[in-house]
Image (cartoon, helix red, strand yellow):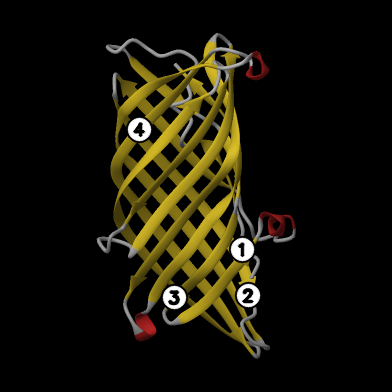
């Protein structure tokens, strides 16, 4: 099954706030947005009304899959002192075809929207000393943040099933909310070079059975039209395991969305 998507938008989770060239005063608000490209692969299973389709597609499949459609994502953060807020949204529409057995074709369209928000807290900001000139020199710092929030997911899935020339349309809509907790660590190796690791886990049976996300990035900071900016590249993954109903009403979304990302974060 060739099912893949590229996300374009206004977010880069993990660098948007923690990789900053200058620390703001404790009583000042700092905001950030980030346009980026996420070249995703999808792996997992989706079941609608008892009809299961297996997804196994790399980013390279996008170049061959004419049904793949570009989506959009946006992320923003606001920080004051050790506390912060974040909001993240994504919308995408994906099309694909699979042949589970000979003479059976399934054309699947997935429309997905995700809205996530929460509260962040900076646990610590530690000075690790100075780096050597080989890394550009400057102060090395480690910043650790935790966060808690919720992730809302809305899915609309439609299947056009063709069996020996006979066609049938099938589909379903599902929406759920997952609580989540997470953390991210930023190593400012120099004034310009940063490494970022982050991840969260959630669901706990309240919405999905389980969901998690993880990201790793390397960023380079500079001035862009007088504003602090960071260009970063890395890898991001999101996993969701949601189940509802049984038999002919069975709905399952057991999917991992993952791939390399690159983008620029602007702080003001």
Q: Which mark is residue 67?
A: none
Disc 1 versus disc 3: distance between alpha carbons? 16 Å
Q: Residue at x 29, y 43 (%)?
A: 149
Foreground disc of the pair 4, 2: 4
Looking at the picture, does residue 58 appear above or below residue 17?
below
Q: Secondary structure at mark 1?
A: loop
The residue where tag 4 is placed is 145
- Total labels: the figure holds 4
Q: Quadrant of the C terminus?
A: top left
Q: Secondary structure at mark 4?
A: strand
Q: Position of residue 264 (x, y in %)?
A: 57, 28
* CA neighbours of label 2 inside 10 A, class few (<14), some (14 to 19), many (20+): some
Precedes in sequence: disc 3 or disc 4: 3
Disc 2 versus disc 3: distance between alpha carbons? 14 Å
The residue where tag 3 is placed is 48
Of residues 138 and 24, the one drawn nearer to the viewer in this rendering: 138
* CA neighbours of label 1 inside 10 A, class few (<14), some (14 to 19), many (20+): many
Q: Position of residue 41 (x, y in %)?
A: 60, 56
Q: Which mark is residue 98?
A: 2
Disc 2 versus disc 1: distance between alpha carbons? 9 Å
Task: Tell me, yes or no, whether the two marked residues, 2 and 1, touch with CB atoms within 8 Å.
Answer: yes
Looking at the picture, does residue 212 appear above or below residue 54?
above
The residue where tag 1 is placed is 3
């Amino acid at each position: 099954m060739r099912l893949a998507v590229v996300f374009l938008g206004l977010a880069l989770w993990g660098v948007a706030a923690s990789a900053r060239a200058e620390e703001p005063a404790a009583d000042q608000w700092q905001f950030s947005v980030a346009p980026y490209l996420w070249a995703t692969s999808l792996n997992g299973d989706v079941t609608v009304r008892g009809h299961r389709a297996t997804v196994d597609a790399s980013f390279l499949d996008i170049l061959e899959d004419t049904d793949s459609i570009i989506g959009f994502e946006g992320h923003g953060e606001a920080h004051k002192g050790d506390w912060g807020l974040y909001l993240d949204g994504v919308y995408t529409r994906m099309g694909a075809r699979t042949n589970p057995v000979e003479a059976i074709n399934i054309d699947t369209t997935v429309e997905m929207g995700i809205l996530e928000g929460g509260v962040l807290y900076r646990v610590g900001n530690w000075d690790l000393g100075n780096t050597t000139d080989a890394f550009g020199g400057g102060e090395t710092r480690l910043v650790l943040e935790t966060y808690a929030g919720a992730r809302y997911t809305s899915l609309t899935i439609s299947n056009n099933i063709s069996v020996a020339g006979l066609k049938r349309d099938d589909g379903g809509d599902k929406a759920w909310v997952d609580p989540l907790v997470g953390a991210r660590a930023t190593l400012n190796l120099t004034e310009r070079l940063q490494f970022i690791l982050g991840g969260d886990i959630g669901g706990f049976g309240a919405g999905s059975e389980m969901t998690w996300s993880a990201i790793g990035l390397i960023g380079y900071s500079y001035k862009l039209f007088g504003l602090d900016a960071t260009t970063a590249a890395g890898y991001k993954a999101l996993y969701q395991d949601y189940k509802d109903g049984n038999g002919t009403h069975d709905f399952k979304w057991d999917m991992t969305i993952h791939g390399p990302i690159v983008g620029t974060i602007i702080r003001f």
